Image (spheres, rainbow, N blue to C red):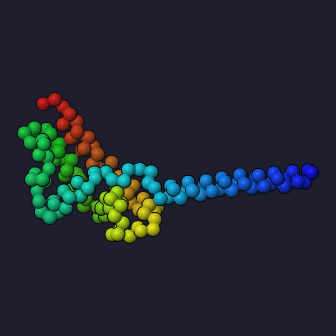
Amino acid sequence: MAVLLSEEKKKGVSAIFLVLLCYTTINLLYSAMNPTFEITTLGGGAYSIIEKVNAGASLDDIVCSQSRGRKNAEKACMRFWESVVDLSKDERWYSAYKHSIQLEANDYQDVGMHFLPWSYLYRQDIKYVRDEFDANVKKHLMAYMNVLNEKQ
């Protein structure tokens, strides 16, 4: 009877171990396929503005229309968009930013990520987009938002 009981315990321990192994594997796969940070920083709107500026358009003509007539707001808006355009000159950032927009739209064809869209390397690129945005642009965005929230 004692031998039979220990065999049942072994089966129970094996079953618990198998359940934990499956749970851990599923969690690791889920983590590998899903980001743990925001995908984009500015949405697709900034992409079109960056493209227009790269094509020769002036920032004065395409942004900050709601700030016209408010000198501080217009200046803060221009500083923000100039920092975005400056950041877009970093090839790695700009390429990863375009990829993040495609990922958010579930458009993987140009990104080459059909099988595992959230592979480690692409997650690192998207993290780079976020980190560089936070380091170089976010302060200008916050300053602009603060000016807009001030009473006229």
- Asked if 57 appears above or below 151 in the picture, the reply is below
Figure quadrant of residue 34: bottom left
Task: Spot the residue most to the right.
Answer: 1
Q: Position of residue 95 (x, y in %)?
A: 31, 64
Image location of residue 86, percent across then percent down = 22, 56
* Residue 38 left/right relative to 86: right
Q: Is residue 98 above or below residue 12?
A: below
- Numbered marks: total: 0
Image quadrant of residue 97?
A: bottom left
Between 58 and 35, the residue placed more toward the observer is 35
Q: Residue at x 29, y 45 (%)?
A: 138
x, y percentage for residue 94?
Answer: 29, 61
- Picture quadrant where residue 73 is located: top left
Q: Position of residue 29 (x, y in %)?
A: 53, 59
Residue at the spot x=92%, y=51% of the render? 1
- Identity of the residue drawn at 7% across and 39% down: 69
Residue 84 in view (yes/no): yes
> Does residue 100 appear in the picture of this structure?
no
In the displayed structure image, the side of residue 96 where residue 4 appears, left or right:
right
73 relative position to 22: left or right: left
Q: Residue at x 10, y 38 (%)?
A: 70
**Which residue, as the protein is rendered here, is positioned at the far top?**
151
